[in-house]
Amino acid sequence: MSTHDPAIAIVGPGNVGSAIARRLVAAGFSRVTFGVRAGSKIAEALAELDGKVSASLAPEAAAGADIIFLAVPGTAAVAAAQALGDLRGKIVVDCNNPLTWNQGPVWAPPPEGSITAALQAALPGVRVLKAFNTFGAEFHADPSLGDTVADVPIAGDDADAKATLSALIQRAGFRPLDAGPLRNAAALENMAVLWIHLALVGGQGRDVAFKLLSRG
């Protein structure tokens, strides 16, 4: 894998996936591909990216990728990942959150404890990380936060994969934060619940993001 310009597949070209693609292209990543289902209509998304992102069927995009961003409905994440074929050795970034709604967002994890843990259990030999799940698509597209940038916490058990993703995050204009082992993916999903509540129920609006500040 080229650490300077890794091959990246984005499975799920919806609001979040498309915003991630825009940010990566703006940061100079040149090997970005949408992984789509047969019959998906993404011409508009591709046109907005001026031809700098290609599209292919999701298993083909994943096969050629070093890093795979999974940005699909939370309930579909495991099935979507399993449908990609042999991912052993690849980095899969879980951008998803398991939610229901009851006058606000409610965390609804699978039996494994988080979507990330469920993915890791279903994908032996794959380097699964949780990241890019704690803010809305507006920040996926543009990390600016006043005079600083949004943080991207990362949870996972593979230190080398974290280092690779951290380099991508920093190059894309965010600040990476090592949020600990994969079990802490549950905490990041709950951060997302809090963000959604603040943004959509609590009156803060969507132009807010979490930031770890230091006195030093």
Image: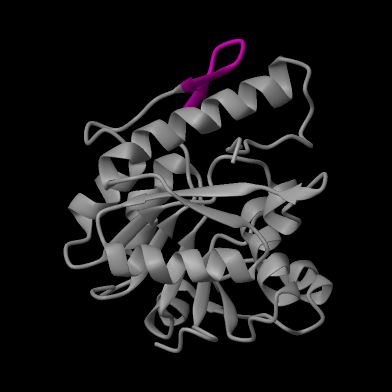
Q: Position of residue 97 (x, y in %)?
A: 47, 38
For the N terminus, which image quadrant?
bottom left
Q: Position of residue 82 (x, y in %)?
A: 29, 61
Residue displayed at 66% across by 47% down: 150
For the C terminus, which image quadrant?
top right
Q: Quadrant of residue 212?
A: top right
Looking at the picture, does residue 170 appear above or below residue 179? below
Q: Quadrant of residue 141?
A: bottom right
Residue 53 visible: yes
Residue 37 visible: no
Looking at the picture, does residue 124 appear above or below residue 67? above
Residue displayed at 22% across by 36% down: 112
Give the extent of the magenta segment: 98-106
Looking at this rendering, what residue extends furthest in the bottom direction?
Answer: 2
Left or right: 199, with 97 as reference point: right
Please say which color scheme the image uses: one colour
Q: Position of residue 158 (x, y in %)?
A: 26, 61
Q: Position of residue 121 (x, y in %)?
A: 19, 51
Residue displayed at 54% across by 33% down: 192
Q: Viewer-proximal residue, 79 or 5?
A: 5
